[in-house]
Image: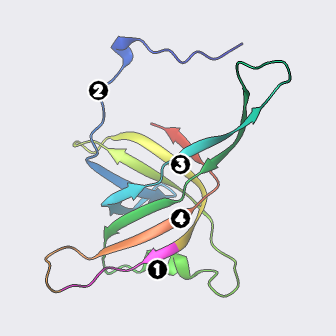
């Protein structure tokens, strides 16, 4: 039986605004982030030519691949993200963590949850320090992972 992906217009909620999102590890909210990018999944395709069929190519689905996730937030006293990156620095035994990225509305209700499977940091970037600006010091963490699951 084939799945149907049709929704009724009355079931369609209004679009969510990007108001606030948090990262949650083991049901504990770890940090509120300023920016998140890389929630991307893409399927490779293989194009196959068939002899005698000159009006098209066969397009076959291949593997899915996931982009690295980049998280940015204002620096705090906590060194947790730095410490996570440091694990495996010398022996290659990184700490893989399942975690969630939660999109919340103004009232604080969770609208969407992206569950990240076996993520580990591949890049940590400290703030740009410039006394000429009044901007918040931003810490950046780039995370590789084995997949995403979407829930609400």
How far is the residue under mark 2 from the one under mark 3?
A: 23 Å
User: Is 90 placed left or right of 24 in the picture?
Assistant: right
User: Front-most of 82 and 50?
Assistant: 50
Name the residue that disc number 2 marks. Answer: 14
Report the span colored magenta.
Answer: 123-130
Asked which secondary structure carries label 1, the reply is: helix
Q: Residues within 10 Å of mark 4 (few under 14, many from 20)?
A: many
| Disc marking residue 82 | 1
User: Is 150 placed left or right of 8 in the picture?
Assistant: right
Sooner in the amino-acid sequence: mark 4 or mark 2: 2
| Disc marking residue 143 | 4
Q: Is residue 117 above or below residue 55?
A: below
Picture residue at 79% right of the left edge, 18% below the top: 53
Sooner in the amino-acid sequence: mark 3 or mark 4: 3
How far is the residue under mark 3 from the one under mark 4?
A: 13 Å
Q: In which quarter of the image is the C terminus?
A: top left
Name the residue that disc number 3 marks. Answer: 115
Sooner in the amino-acid sequence: mark 1 or mark 4: 1
User: Front-most of 47 and 79?
Assistant: 47
Asked which secondary structure carries label 2, the reply is: loop
How far is the residue under mark 1 from the one under mark 4?
A: 12 Å
Residue 92 pos. (x, y %)? 69, 80
How far is the residue under mark 4 from the one under mark 2?
A: 30 Å
Q: On the image, which quarter does residue 129 sit in?
A: bottom left
Membership of 3 in magenta stretch: no
How far is the residue under mark 1 from the one under mark 2?
A: 38 Å
């Amino acid at each position: 039986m084939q799945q149907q992906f049709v929704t009724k217009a009355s079931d369609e909620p209004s679009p969510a605004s990007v108001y606030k999102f948090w990262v949650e590890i083991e049901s504990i909210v770890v940090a509120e982030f300023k920016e998140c990018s890389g929630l991307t999944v893409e399927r490779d395709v293989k194009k196959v030519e068939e002899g005698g069929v000159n009006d098209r190519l066969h397009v076959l689905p291949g593997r899915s691949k996931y982009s690295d996730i980049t998280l940015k937030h204002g620096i705090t006293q906590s060194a947790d993200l730095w410490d996570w990156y440091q694990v495996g620095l010398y022996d290659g035994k990184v700490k893989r963590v399942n975690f969630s990225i939660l999109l919340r509305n103004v009232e604080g209700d969770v609208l969407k949850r992206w569950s990240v499977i076996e993520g580990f940091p591949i890049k940590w970037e400290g703030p740009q320090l410039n006394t000429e600006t009044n901007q918040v010091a931003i810490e950046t963490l780039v995370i590789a992972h084995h997949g995403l699951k979407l829930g609400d």
